[in-house]
């Protein structure tokens, strides 16, 4: 989604702003723009397309010590020049970059039209910048506050006013924003990755806050003018973690990072001698934690890949901890008036911690009195702050739009929670011990699968021109089938469907012919035999079988056309292994087709609009 960035200080900031925008390219965008103040004049350069094109357009023509910049992911209006940010007020003095959506923009527009304002774009942002002009009476801070008091919706904004060039204003309601602290220079940004090369000291803004930024200080206030003392925090990751480090794409790097990230998600959380797990983010809040331990019902709310890991969580928690679980798309949960009674606990799962639908579901659940736990990757994200307690994934920054390492870490964290719950309820030491011991071996097993990547690459070459794929799995591996299909369609634009394997004969079987690759997740587990029956059904209709199967399984070699072998592991942990070949298959097919794997068309890394 959109990225915003601003600088004020004593250095030429054009390079910094362009580099900072490039750091958030992964979030998805379709146009980019920059405003620079050179001490006398302001210049705006913006256009649809990639940042590299904007960079070419700017060349050496711009220099200045203050500026604001933006990448836009179109919501109101097409991604053309007029709709790109920064937007400027009618009098040419006020410039605005904005993430989010002004919901009441139509009524604000009418109000401003009556005051003879003219609009040149289709955006809600242009309305806000003119509203700020409307209220401007010599103090940009006050004008922004007055304008925001009229606004309904979400925003993270950065404002520059040529009548007060020594100050930038930043304000936040629902869209992430932070202040970067430098020496004789300061920054605002929607993503810490944009400023990390300059500073690792940041102040995270919260909803309803405004920051008045000069080169020497930053004053934090609420929008109704109460001064705030804010903590300076350190960015929780290193620069090397947001670089490709020799890989062709971030996605490939992140797939190969999984032995380490899986380990990081478990580190310090396994009590082998007690055959259980302990998550500080939960146990440090005993009263809230006991609500989870005694939950009568759990809802898991999430979107996309996080929803798939939530489904695995449902299978795990119901089978091992015997608590009823319902998994909901966050976007549906919010609007369908779910039944929340005393004892209902909601777990929100999100890599970014900023997904608008998931946030809205959390708010709705809290409004109805549920206790809400978060499972997030991004430290300090909005969801991590909005929930009563929660657990971080510690998977490090995920840049590739197609989520990979966050998925395996989510499944790990859900397994850790399941074991903790189950051991408090009904699971024996013996069973707990067996599972946590296997958890510890997972990084090595994932490493082993990754060593086989060349074979998967070869397979990808064979199937890169297929126009449809079917992914089938059962039990814990049914959500993996959904995830495999999602990965493929996201980055290769090949149509793919995921189904529970047995459900195939109720409809999708009609699609099967000699051109249809069918990926079966057929690990040796309690329903293996049933999956084999489903494989035979596809084979009988001449479908092409690609099977993800256990090392010891020789039977499958006789039925499937292509087999990718993986180590054997207990049922509940199986998805962490079976998903790896599917991630690689999707990646190599997309790379073979020459697509921009890290920035697939139309997609944003963090979907901050509903
Ligand atoms: O940041 P979140 O986990 O809340 O994001 C949810 C989805 O938008 C995300 O998983 C999306 O489906 C990815 N592109 C999947 O690869």
Image: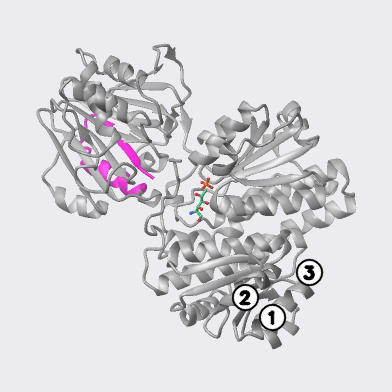
Residue 324 visible from this viewpoint:
yes
Residue ID for mark 2: 509
Report if the CB atoms under discs 3 and 1 are less than 8 Å apart: no
Q: Mark 2 CB in 8 Å range of ligand 1?
A: no
Mark closer to the chain start, 3 or 1 = 3
Q: Residue at x 29, y 22 (%)?
A: 216
- 257 above or below 330? below
Q: Residue at x 33, y 17 (%)?
A: 145
Q: Is residue 395 above or below residue 112?
A: below
Picture coordinates of residue 72, whole percent (x, y):
31, 44
Horizontal side, residue 530 vs residue 311: left or right: right
- Mark nearer the viewer, 2 or 1: 2
Residue 237 image offset from top left, x and y in percent: 49, 43
Q: Are marks 3 and 2 in contact (CB under 8 Å)?
A: no
Q: Is residue 47 magenta?
A: no
**Residue at disc 1, CB closer than 8 Å to ligand 1:** no
Quadrant in which residue 365 is drawn: top right
The range drawn in magenta is 1-24
Q: Earlier in the sequence, mark 2 or mark 1?
A: 2
Q: Which residue in the protein does label 1 denote?
A: 537
Residue 36 x, y percent position in the rendering: 18, 35
Per the image, label 3 sits on a secondary structure element best described as loop
Labels 2 and 1 touching (C-beta < 8 A):
yes
Q: Residue at x 81, y 51 (%)?
A: 320
Q: Which residue is mark 3?
A: 527
């Amino acid at each position: 989604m959109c990225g915003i960035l601003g600088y004020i200080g004593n250095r030429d900031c054009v390079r910094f702003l362009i580099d900072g925008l490039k750091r958030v390219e992964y979030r998805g965008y379709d146009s980019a723009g920059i405003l620079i103040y050179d001490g006398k004049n302001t210049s705006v350069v913006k256009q649809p397309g990639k940042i590299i094109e904007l960079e070419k357009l700017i060349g050496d023509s711009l220099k200045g010590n203050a500026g604001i910049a933006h990448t836009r992911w179109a919501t109101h209006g097409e991604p053309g020049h007029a709709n790109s940010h920064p937007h400027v007020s009618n009098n040419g003095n006020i410039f605005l970059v904005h993430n989010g959506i002004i919901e009441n923009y139509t009524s604000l527009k009418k109000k401003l039209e009556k005051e003879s304002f003219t609009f040149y774009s289709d955006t809600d942002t242009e309305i806000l910048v003119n509203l700020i002009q409307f209220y401007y009476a010599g103090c940009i801070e006050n004008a922004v506050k007055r304008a925001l008091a009229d606004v309904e919706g979400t925003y993270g904004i950065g404002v520059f006013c040529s009548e007060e060039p020594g100050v930038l204003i930043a304000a936040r309601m629902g869209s992430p924003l932070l202040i970067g602290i430098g020496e004789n220079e300061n920054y605002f940004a929607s993503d810490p990755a944009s400023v990390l090369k300059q500073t690792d000291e940041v102040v995270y803004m919260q909803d309803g806050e405004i920051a008045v930024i000069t080169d020497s200080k930053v004053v934090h206030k609420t929008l109704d003018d109460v001064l705030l003392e804010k903590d300076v925090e350190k960015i929780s990751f290193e620069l090397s973690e947001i670089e490709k480090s020799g890989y062709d794409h971030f996605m490939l790097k992140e797939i190969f990072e999984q032995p380490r990230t899986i380990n990081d998600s478990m580190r310090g959380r396994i009590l082998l001698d007690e055959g259980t797990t302990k998550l500080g983010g939960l146990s440090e809040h005993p009263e809230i934690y006991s609500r989870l331990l005694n939950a009568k019902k759990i809802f898991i709310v999430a979107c996309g890949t996080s929803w798939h890991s939530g489904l695995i969580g449902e299978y795990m928690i119901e089978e091992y901890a015997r608590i009823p679980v319902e998994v909901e798309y966050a976007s549906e949960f919010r609007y369908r008036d779910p039944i929340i009674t005393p004892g209902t606990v909601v777990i929100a799962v999100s890599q970014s911690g900023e997904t608008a639908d998931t946030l809205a579901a959390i708010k709705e659940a809290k409004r109805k009195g549920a206790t809400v736990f978060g499972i997030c990757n991004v430290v300090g994200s909005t969801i991590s702050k909005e929930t009563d307690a929660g657990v971080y994934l510690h998977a490090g920054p995920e840049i590739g739009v197609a989520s990979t390492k966050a998925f395996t870490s989510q499944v790990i964290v859900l397994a850790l929670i399941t074991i903790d719950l189950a051991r408090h309820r009904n699971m024996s030491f013996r069973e707990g011990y067996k599972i946590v011991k296997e958890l510890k071996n997972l990084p090595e097993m994932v490493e082993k699968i990754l060593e086989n990547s060349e074979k998967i690459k070869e397979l990808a070459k064979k199937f890169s021109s297929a126009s449809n794929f079917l992914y089938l799995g059962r039990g814990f591996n049914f959500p993996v089938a959904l995830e495999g299909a999602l990965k493929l369609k996201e980055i290769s634009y090949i149509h793919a469907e995921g189904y529970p394997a047995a459900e195939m004969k109720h409809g999708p079987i009609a699609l099967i012919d000699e051109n249809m690759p069918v990926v079966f997740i057929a690990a040796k587990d309690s329903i293996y035999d049933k999956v084999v029956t489903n494989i035979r059904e596809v084979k009988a209709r001449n479908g092409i079988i690609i099977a993800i199967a256990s090392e010891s399984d020789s039977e499958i070699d006789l039925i499937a056309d292509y087999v990718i072998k993986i180590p054997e592991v207990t049922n509940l942990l199986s998805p962490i292994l079976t998903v790896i070949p599917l991630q690689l298959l999707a990646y190599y097919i997309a790379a073979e087709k020459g697509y921009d794997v890290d920035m697939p068309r139309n997609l944003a890394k963090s979907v901050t609009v509903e």
